[in-house]
Every structure is written in structure tokens, then in C-alpha cells.
Amino acid sequence: MTNPHQYQQHEIDAVYRAIRERRDMRHFLPDPIDPAQLARFIGAAHAAPSVGYMQPWRFLRITDGALRRALHAHVDAERALTAEALGERSGEFMRLKVEGILACGELLVVGLVEGRERYVFGRRTMPEMDLASASCAIQNFWLAARAEGIGVGWVSLFDPEHVRALCGMPEGARPIALLCVGHVDAFYPEPMLQAERWDSRRDIGELLYDNAWGVPAVPHAD
């Protein structure tokens, strides 16, 4: 039976293609991003679902070169601390490229707005749903950028309180991502951490359960 609400097949294919080919990018070209294009990506982010319609996301565009360099220096220091915490995998980790902060055309700090405690709808027992909502916004941004051929990298190697202070964010606000946004020479053919053999994608069968946690889903006949 035809579903009257579905898109045309070529539109459906484009959505799934963007999902399949989205990559966490670390290598960028220095070319600037068209301001109208960046505005579209932020508009896509702002169209994301949010628990209780709280819209907790805020985007801070970093245009000051000194601030960008300070953020990079902090991330680089955290990279060394992360390597130390990884123990036997530290050397392997240090060989990975984990960010493109100084090379990307645009750098954004994504944060959770202050005063989130007043939003109770959907958060009374799960206050972390503010983070879940903002993550949906970032995914929207990422997919819109991929569809337009622009790379995005999510950097999370930082101390939120340090970045909050660097960026003049008020008490109670919380940075959750540094987004490197820019033109790329090419998109990685597979996730970089998979290509570098850091880890591999799980099989769907390992992730889908039926009725009780850990009970593998039974394939249904067509």
C-alpha cells in the first residue's frame, strides 16, 4: 500500500545517503564558508526535536584568532591527558588526528543554555535529556552540511569549565562540542577511527533485542 506521507524515492535515497556518508572530519581546506550556507546549517540544527520544546542549544561562532588558538591549545593539552589515561593504547591514540581546529573555515562552540533546571517537562527523572536534545541539533547540522558537501568534526576533548570560561559563557551554561566546519578535499570512505583500526562498527544483530535486554531479536519472515 502506498504511504501518502512518504517522500519521492529520490528524496528518500538522498536522506539515507547523507546518513550513510556523514563523517567526523579532521582534515580541512582553508577556504571560507559562505555565510548563507552556515546560516542554513544552523537553521537545520534549530529545527531539531527537543524534550519539552526546551531548545537548549546555543551556537557561539569563534571569529577571534586568539580565542581559536587558545581553544586549540586547551584541546591539545587534553589530548595528552587522554593519551595518558588510555595506558597501553596511548601511543596508538597520539598517532590519530583528532581535530582540525586551526585549519577549518569555521569554528563553533555548541553549548547548553543556562537556567535549564526550570525545564521539568520530560526531564524530571532524566535531566540529561537537555544533552540528548542538543545532540539531535548537532546531528541535523552535520547531515545538512554533508548534503551540501561541507565537512564537520565534533571535538569533545576539553574541560567544559575551562571552555566555558574562555568563551565567557554564564554560570550554568555548559559547552558540549567544538564543531570544526569547512571545505574538504575528500570525505573519508569510511569512519576514520574504523580505517585506523581503533574500533569497528558493531553488527546490527548485536544491538537489537526483543522484549528483554540482551535477548537477541528473532528475524521475522517476509
Image: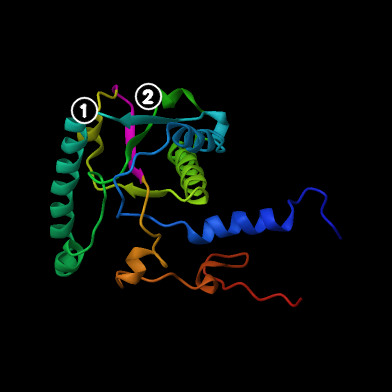
Query: Helix or strand or loop: what does disc 1 sit on?
Result: helix
User: Quadrant of the image for the C terminus?
Assistant: bottom right
Left or right, 135 with respect to 31, comes to right
Left or right, 44 with respect to 34, comes to right
Which residue is more in the foreground, 103 or 169? Answer: 103
Mark 1 is on which residue type? Ala
Mark 2 is on which residue type? Glu
Which residue is more in the foreground, 69 or 214? Answer: 69
Residue drawn at the location 26% of the way across and 51% of the way down: 99
* Number of numbered callouts drawn: 2
- Residue 182 visible in the shown view: yes
Residue drawn at the location 34% of the way across and 39% of the way down: 32
Q: Residue furthest right?
A: 1
Q: Where is residue 31 in the image (x, y as percent from the top left)?
A: 33, 43
Magenta span contains residue 172: yes
Which residue was labeled with disc 2? Answer: 114
* Mark 2: few/some/many CA within 10 Å (<14, 14-19, 20+): some
Q: Position of residue 171 (x, y in %)?
A: 28, 23
Cα gap from disc 1 to disc 2, whole angstroms: 14 Å
The secondary structure making up most of the magenta span is strand
Q: Where is residue 162 in the image (x, y as percent from the top left)?
A: 19, 34
Residue drawn at the location 14% of the way across and 52% of the way down: 81
Q: Nearer the viewer, mark 1 or mark 2?
A: 1
Which residue was labeled with disc 1? Answer: 165
Work out whether 25 lies above or below 131.
below
Which residue is more in the foreground, 164 or 68? Answer: 68
Magenta residues? 170-181
**Which picture quadrant has residue 87?**
bottom left
Left or right, 95 with respect to 181, comes to left
Which residue is more in the foreground, 14 or 36? Answer: 36
Magenta span contains residue 190: no
Disc on res. 95:
none
